[in-house]
Image: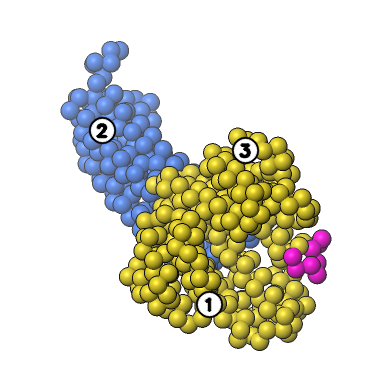
């Protein structure tokens, strides 16, 4: 047991007080309309003076606040690799698509990662893949060549998304902290299950599924893809025999219940960190909890903007960490 | 004055030094750990300063217990009054042994009380109304420092010089 995270964990405990609970999300859903929701969030301290009335800017500012806190804790950013890889690989995907299609799009890159948008664009334009981290180089080259020659955007997505899952899993396996290992395992397994469900619904081939899925310990990619090919009942039956049996029940309920279960599974993985005082676990859990909170608020705001009934919104909201 | 002629006194003085040094070190470590946690909470919520300060001070008592035993020992061997008593090496060793409980238990309990205080500061950070309950957890560790103080105190006093 190390005391090097004592300051960080105590500070995170103080910050956890301001995390949204399930009842706060209920209050947000109960707001009359989109504007009242924004006002509610502003009263809770979301966003800043520059983001008033702009939901997207407010959510982006909240995401930035998470990493500002993490940087102040003086913890090496390598511990957060499992959390930053999705953004980093998103930047790669966006840069390859922008270069290959020659279409300029604004605000499609994340800037708070080790390779921000402009740097990633330069690397892809110059085809200088050696400047990328080792776990991105091969996928970047393969995705770039395939998009350039086949113009198949989905194939490009599959190559990069699988590389991202492999990178998350490898970072998890090499981590000392148990929460990082558990998070990586859950993330990859849940992503594989999502791929299987969506592939089953869109009648994808087994080759496609195997190409998209990443290997992990808790799910057998071969059996999962065969089950998905056999049909939804076979897929549910396979999941019932794994640690993700609840996912099978959610799948029977509705597609949105399944998506909700996927995120809740991650929150359940990090929940024990509420009682941990001396490891990096509570810090990692706080980052995931904040990201989950922002995602949930985005779902509620989208629902309100599109005048969805409160019950439909409630069905889609995620379980909160506190 | 040769050190060998006053070996008893040297042993007794070593006992006093161990009591103060080890128990003080335990407190310093404990207060340091709890202080890091207290700083983390006050960074986000300065209104909790008083509560977390009390938590931080809890592991500081071991140092005081060590100091008390050190004083009693110095007084016993006459070093505080200016006239050191003559004592055999056996008596000196007995005083050294009498000082060990508070020295060793003070070091270990100080560190662990600090860790428990840091964890309890986490309770105060999230639920300030549970301050009383939170304080009980580190206070439990104190029991063993008090028991060690009692034995060291009784033993030093019981030795005839």
**Dot 2 surroundings within 10 Å: few (below 14), some, or many (20 or more)?**
many
Circle 1 marks a residue in which chain?
A
Dot 1 falls on a residue whose secondary structure is helix
Residue denoted by label 2: B96
Residue A65, above or below B105: below
In this figure, which colouring scheme has been used for the structure?
by chain
The quadrant of the rendering that contains the C terminus of chain B is top left
Q: Mark 3 lies on which chain?
A: A
Give the residues in magenta: A49-56
Q: Is residue B129 in view from this perspective?
A: no
Say which of marks 1 and 3 sits in front.
3
**Which residue is found at the position 80% from the left and 70% from the top?**
A53
Residue nearer the viewer, B109 or A51: A51
Residue at image mark 1 = A255
Looking at the image, the residue that sits furthest to the front is A149
Q: Which of A217 and A104 is in front in this view?
A: A104
- Is residue A116 among the parts visible in the rendering? yes
Give the Cα separation between the discs numbered 3 and 2. 69 Å
Contact flag, marks 1 and 3 (Cβ < 8 Å): no
- Against A251, is B110 above or below? above
Q: In which quarter of the image is the N terminus of chain B?
A: top left
Badges 1 and 2: C-beta atoms under 8 Å apart? no
Residue B86 in the image: state x and y as whole percent: 25, 24
Nearer the observer: mark 3 or 2; the answer is 3
Instruction: Report the residue at 26% width, 33% height from top.
Output: B96
Identify residue for label 3.
Answer: A129
Where does the image place residue A71, in percent across and percent down from the top left? 62, 47
Which chain did the renderer colour yellow? A
Question: Residue at position x 79%, y 63% from top?
Answer: A51
**Is B6 positioned to the left or the right of B67 in the image?**
left
Q: How crowded is mark 1: few (under 14 residues within 10 Å), some or many (20 or more)?
A: some
């Amino acid at each position: 047991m190390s005391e090097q995270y004592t300051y960080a964990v105590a500070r995170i405990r103080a910050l956890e007080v301001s995390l949204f609970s399930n009842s706060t999300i209920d209050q947000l859903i109960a707001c009359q309309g989109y504007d009242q929701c924004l006002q509610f969030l502003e009263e809770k301290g979301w966003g800043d003076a520059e983001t008033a009335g702009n939901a997207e800017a407010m959510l982006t500012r909240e995401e930035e606040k998470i990493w500002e806190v993490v940087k102040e804790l003086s913890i090496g950013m390598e511990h957060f690799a499992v959390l930053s890889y999705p953004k980093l690989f998103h930047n790669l995907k966006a840069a390859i698509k922008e270069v290959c299609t020659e279409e300029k799009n604004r605000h499609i890159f994340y800037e708070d990662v080790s390779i921000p948008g402009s740097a990633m664009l330069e690397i892809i334009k110059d085809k200088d893949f050696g400047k990328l981290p080792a776990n991105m180089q091969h996928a970047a080259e393969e995705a770039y060549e395939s998009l350039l020659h086949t113009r198949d955007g989905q194939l490009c997505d599959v190559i990069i998304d699988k590389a991202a899952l492999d990178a998350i899993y490898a970072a998890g396996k090499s981590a000392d902290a148990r929460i990082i290992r558990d998070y990586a395992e859950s993330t990859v397994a849940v992503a594989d299950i999502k791929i299987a469900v969506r592939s089953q619904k869109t009648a994808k081939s087994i080759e496609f599924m195997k190409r998209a899925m990443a290997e992990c310990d808790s799910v057998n990619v071969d059996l999962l893809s065969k089950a998905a090919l056999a049909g939804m009942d076979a897929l549910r039956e396979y999941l019932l025999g794994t640690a993700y049996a609840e996912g099978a029940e959610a799948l029977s309920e509705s597609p949105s219940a399944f998506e909700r279960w996927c995120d809740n599974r991650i929150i359940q993985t990090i929940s024990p960190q509420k009682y941990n005082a001396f490891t990096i676990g509570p810090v990692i859990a706080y980052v995931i909890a904040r990201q989950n909170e922002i995602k949930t608020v985005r779902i509620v705001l989208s629902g309100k903007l599109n005048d969805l009934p409160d019950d439909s919104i409630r069905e889609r909201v995620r379980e909160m960490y506190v | 004055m040769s050190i060998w002629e006053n070996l008893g006194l040297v042993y007794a003085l070593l006992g006093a030094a161990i009591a103060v040094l080890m128990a003080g070190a335990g407190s310093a470590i404990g207060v340091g750990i709890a202080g890091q946690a207290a700083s983390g909470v006050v960074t986000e919520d300065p209104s909790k300063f008083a509560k977390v300060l009390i938590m931080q001070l809890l592991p500081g008592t071991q140092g005081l217990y060590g100091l008390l035993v050190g004083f009693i020992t110095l007084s016993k061997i006459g070093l505080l009054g200016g006239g050191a008593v003559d004592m055999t090496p056996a008596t000196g060793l007995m005083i050294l042994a009498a000082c060990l409980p508070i020295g060793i238990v003070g070091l270990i309990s100080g560190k662990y009380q600090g860790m428990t205080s840091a964890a309890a500061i986490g309770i105060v950070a999230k639920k300030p109304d549970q301050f009383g309950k939170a304080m009980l957890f580190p206070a439990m560790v104190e029991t063993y420092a008090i028991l060690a103080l009692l034995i060291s105190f009784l033993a030093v006093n019981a030795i005839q010089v």
